[in-house]
């Protein structure tokens, strides 16, 4: 059974230590003791240590928004993966649409980053999703299929099962509304069918597929009622402890029947 998971990336929205610490403390206070939902926060690199200290006594884990595929050496401005591991990072976000669009990350880069995160025993949260143009041209399925193949290429079955796929349609990021819940369910079902065809039923049933893109306290209910939505990846609308808590509790309520732990 797939454990429900709700995570949030703060991107660069949180831009002061004070603001980040306040937010982490608020989230910790409201949902830090929940066990039925796996939870994580991805702050910016320099904030990780302080956030880790804030969260260490509860059930919310933390991680990073990116990873460097080099272990060490002359890579100015990069962060060694071992340091992320030492900071207790459990999750590594990989291939977010903003990194693909603004920092030129390719599927090949993402393939390497997934392997790197796993090599350091951290969980890759791989973002995949079609663009507005893909959708218009009816090639969203091709985009998703390609992205899944790159992300999981060459992994052992046990490694694959650790990966979390975050379906984030590019056209639904940073908008007022998320993608329609039924549309999301259809795409998640399609992604699971790719997994089954390529890697077998066992893998397809175990990999968690979460949805991201304008998730809010309001739309989290419809989204988490969908069978193939294993959780949510929250952006702007989770930058407030009450909203994040509502999203986690809604996911918990909707998914509790199915979860065996
Ligand atoms: P958003 O971000 O919820 O602010 O649209 C989601 C994401 O990019 O993961």
Image: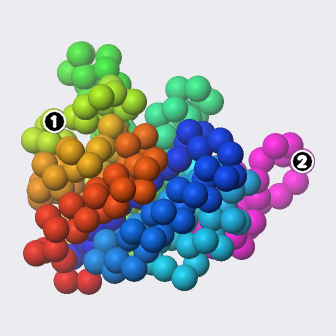
**Mark carried by residue 74:** 2
| Mark 1 Cα shell of 10 Å, populated few (<14), some (14-19), many (≥20) | few
Circle 1 sits in a helix, a strand or a loop, which is it? loop
Q: Is residue 257 above or below residue 224?
A: below
Circle 2 sits in a helix, a strand or a loop, which is it? loop
Residue in the picture at 48% in, 63% down: 26
Q: In this view, does 214 lie above or below 117?
A: above
Q: Please state if 196 lies on the left or on the right of 105 as rendered.
A: left
Query: Where residue 210 appears, x then y in whole percent?
Result: 30, 54
Q: Is residue 55 visible?
A: yes
Span shown in magenta: 66-92
Q: In terms of sequence position, does the residue under pointer 2 or pointer 1 come before the other?
A: 2
Q: In this view, does 146 lie above or below 22?
A: above
Task: Find residue 172 and report its image quarter.
Answer: top left
Q: Distance between the residues labelled 2 and 1?
A: 45 Å
Dominant secondary structure of the residues highlighted in magenta in the image: loop
Looking at the rendering, in which quadrant would you find the C terminus?
Answer: bottom left
Question: Is residue 173 highlighted in magenta?
Answer: no
Query: Where residue 260 appears, x then y in whole percent?
Result: 19, 83
Which sits in the foreground, 190 or 239? 239
Query: Where residue 48 appears, x then y in whole percent?
Result: 66, 61
Q: Name the residue under label 1.
A: 180
Task: Find residue 7 and report its image quarter.
Answer: bottom left
Residue in the picture at 82% in, 43% down: 77
Looking at the rendering, in which quadrant would you find the N terminus?
Answer: bottom left
Q: Do the residues labelled 2 and 1 touch (CB within 8 Å)?
A: no
| Mark 2 Cα shell of 10 Å, populated few (<14), some (14-19), many (≥20) | few
Question: Is residue 70 highlighted in magenta?
Answer: yes
Q: Is ligand 1 less than 8 Å from the beta carbon at label 2?
A: no
């Amino acid at each position: 059974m797939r454990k429900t998971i709700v995570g949030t990336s703060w991107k660069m929205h949180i831009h002061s230590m004070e603001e980040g610490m306040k937010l982490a403390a608020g989230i910790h206070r409201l949902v830090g003791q929940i066990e039925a939902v796996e939870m994580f926060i991805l702050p910016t690199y320099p904030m990780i240590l302080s956030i880790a200290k804030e969260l260490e006594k509860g059930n919310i884990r933390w991680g990073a928004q990116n990873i460097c595929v080099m272990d060490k050496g002359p890579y100015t401005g990069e962060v060694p993966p071992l340091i992320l591991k030492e900071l207790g990072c459990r999750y590594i976000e990989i291939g977010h649409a903003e990194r693909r669009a603004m920092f030129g990350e390719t599927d090949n880069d993402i393939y390497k980053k997934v392997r790197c995160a796993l090599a350091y025993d951290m969980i890759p949260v791989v973002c995949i999703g079609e663009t507005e143009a893909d959708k218009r041209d009816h090639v969203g399925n091709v985009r998703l299929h390609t992205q899944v193949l790159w992300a999981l290429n060459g992994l052992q079955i046990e490694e694959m099962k650790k990966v979390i796929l975050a379906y984030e349609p590019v056209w639904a990021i940073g908008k007022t509304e998320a993608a329609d819940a039924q549309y999301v369910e259809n795409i998640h079902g399609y992604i699971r069918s790719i997994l089954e065809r390529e890697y077998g039923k066992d893998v397809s049933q175990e990999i968690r597929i979460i949805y991201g893109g304008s998730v809010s306290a309001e739309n989290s209910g419809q989204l988490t009622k969908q069978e193939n939505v294993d959780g949510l990846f929250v952006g702007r609308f989770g930058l407030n402890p009450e909203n994040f808590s509502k999203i986690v509790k809604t996911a918990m309520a909707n998914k509790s029947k199915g979860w065996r732990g």
